[in-house]
Amino acid sequence: MRDAPLDDDDLSAAFRVGYDVSQNRLLVAVEIIDDSIVIPDQPSVDWTHVDGCELYLDVTHGQGSGVQLARWGAVMSVQGDAREIRYGVESSVRPRRRVYEWWVDVSTLGPGLQLEPGVDIGFDVAVEDRDADNSFTWTSWGPRTQKLEGNRRLGDWTYEFERALTTSGDPA
Ligand SMILES: [Ca+2]
């Protein structure tokens, strides 16, 4: 969306999903190659003016409201049905590289929800890339935008026995 990345140095990204059954936590690490880091200390009035990373989770699979956790620049935004959610994110920045490490308490996504075989969570990751040349890119692995507003805009993360699988499309 907006400006297409020029090349892999301008913007490329990968994510990995893990879990901690003992703490009932979903863990998501997002690594972004970005040749122009724009994360001001002061909050920006416009989320498209900073680098960011968003995590979408929906245990209702479009029947209810999912949750959007967003790190925009140095500030957090939480939207959707997130009154109870417990989560954290640590971001680290090095030259040309941003890393976001998220954790979410699965029991706060749905009443009593536990990481156990068969658990299936609507899932997506999006990346914002603002650069010093004022270009801006928003991209996600799953389809479409406005991901809290409708079904079929997220992938699925499924916990199956000894392993967990993440299915999603290629980056848009
Ligand atoms: Ca950037």
Image (cartoon, rainbow, N blue to C red):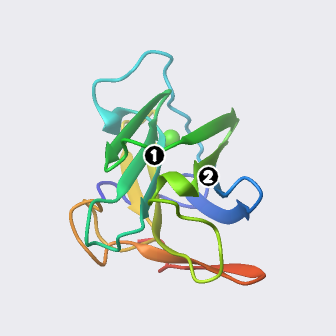
Q: Quadrant of the N terminus?
A: bottom left
Task: Indicate the position of residue 46 as horizontal and vertical percent values.
Answer: 28, 31
Residues packed near mark 2 inside 10 Å, few (<14), some (14 to 19) or many (20 plus): many
The residue depicted at 64 percent of the width and 37 percent of the height is 91
Q: Which residue type does callout 2 highlight?
A: Ile
Residue 160 visible (yes or no):
yes
The residue depicted at 61 percent of the width and 52 percent of the height is 32
Residue 11 visible (yes or no):
no
Residues packed near mark 1 inside 10 Å, few (<14), some (14 to 19) or many (20 plus): many
Task: Indicate the position of residue 146 as horizontal and vertical percent values.
Answer: 25, 59
Callout 1: helix, strand or loop? strand
The residue depicted at 54 percent of the width and 61 percent of the height is 7
Query: Could you tell me how many numbered marks the image carries?
Result: 2
Q: For disc 1, does the CB lie below 8 Å from ligand 1?
A: yes
For the view shown, which residue lies furthest in the top direction? 42
Asked whether the residues under the numbered discs 2 and 1 touch, taking CB atoms below 8 Å apart as contact, a structural biologist would say yes
Task: Indicate the position of residue 171 as horizontal and vertical percent values.
Answer: 47, 71
Task: Indicate the position of residue 77 as horizontal and vertical percent values.
Answer: 39, 36
Say if 144 sits above or below 92 in the image: below
Say if 52 sits above or below 122 in the image: above
Is 126 left, or right, of 89 in this rendering?
A: left
Is 24 left, or right, of 86 in this rendering?
A: right
Q: Quadrant of the C terminus?
A: bottom left
Residue annotated with mark 1: 129
The image quadrant that residue 134 belongs to is: top left
The residue depicted at 75 percent of the width and 80 percent of the height is 163
Say if 123 sits above or below 5 in the image: below
Residue annotated with mark 2: 32
